[in-house]
Amino acid sequence: DARVTQTPRDKVTEMGQEVTMRCQPILGHNTVFWYRQTMMQGLELLAYFRNRAPLDDSGMPKDRFSAEMPDATLATLKIQPSEPRDSAVYFCASGFLGFGGRGGEQFFGPGTRLTVL
Amino acid sequence: AQTVTQSQPEMSVQEAETVTLSCTYDTSENNYYLFWYKQPPSRQMILVIRQEAYKQQNATENRFSVNFQKAAKSFSLKISDSQLGDTAMYFCAFMKPLPQGAQKLVFGQGTRLTINP
């Protein structure tokens, strides 16, 4: 049963520390998405990649956030330095772009709950 | 900008009853996808059902079905014979086509559904 995996599941850190979240997408999916979920803002798209190339990261604070996909099996989201307002659940999702077939479906990982003190 | 509105922040029904969750959206696009996602207390985002805008037939998945009214921009989810395991947050989402073949999911704020024994 293929699924998206994320590590760590929970992370507590102090303000100013670097945080790295990792995601393994479903093998064969050509698109990887990063979302952030908070009570106030709901689910927001931060960035996404198609065939490992960044396609849109306009939802991401550029000064402290960075997203990369060094290979087809690993996507990373890094925050440096972290701030208390970054506390949220961060989801990775993978799927196929395009309409028709299975296009449009996104499969989510279990999320990383980040708490910045 | 595309928006998705879920007007029911919370709903509660008895086990085995049928419940309908509402969703409206705003778009000028003609071709798009609509989704319902379920988020139980485990926080995993689970795809429940998907509807392609060009299809007039309403999508169904076992006990889950939708009422898609394209002209009214309405996309409600009906859960028949509700079960305790259906207790979760339910998110309606709109798939927005972007330039370069990109796509973006826009989520509603969610409806918290509780199934009571």
Image (cartoon, rainbow, N blue to C red):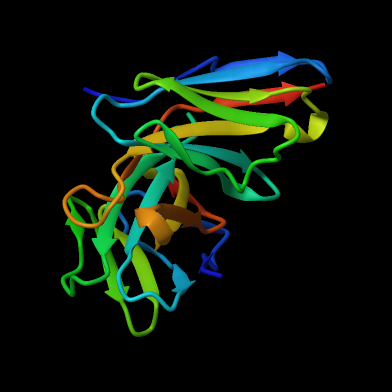
Judge by depth and name the residue closer to the eye, A75 or A15. A75
Q: What residue lies at 51% left-to-right and 19% top-to-bottom?
A: A22
Q: Is residue A7 left or right of B47 when viewed as pictured?
A: right
Q: Name the quadrant containing residue B72.
A: bottom left
**In the rendered image, is residue A40 in sight?**
yes
Q: Measuring 57% from the left and 20% from the top, which residue is drawn there?
A: A21
Measured as percent of width and height from the top left, residue A87 is found at: 72, 31
- Rendered-image quadrant of the N terminus of chain B: bottom right
Quadrant of the image for the C terminus of chain B? top left
- Taking depth in this image into account, of B40 and A112 the one nearest to the observer is A112
Rendered view: B20 above or below A112: below
Q: Is the residue A15 above or below the residue A91 in the image?
A: above
Relative to B101, B63 lies left or right: left
**Could you say which is closer to the camera, residue A26 or residue B7?**
A26
Residue A8: where, in percent of width, then height? Answer: 55, 14
Mark yes or no: residue B83 visible. Answer: no
Q: Position of residue A74 (x, y in %)?
A: 42, 19
Residue B51 to residue A72: above or below: below
- Residue at horizontal 66 percent and vertical 33 percent from the top: A88
Left or right: A42 as drawn, with respect to B31:
right
Residue B59 falls in image quadrant: bottom left
- Residue B98 in the figure: left or right of residue A12: left
Residue A99 lies, with reference to residue A96, above or below; the image says: below
- Residue A116's x, y, as percent? 77, 23
- The extreme bottom residue here reads B71
Q: How many marks?
A: 0
Q: Give the residue at x 57% y 56%.
A: B109
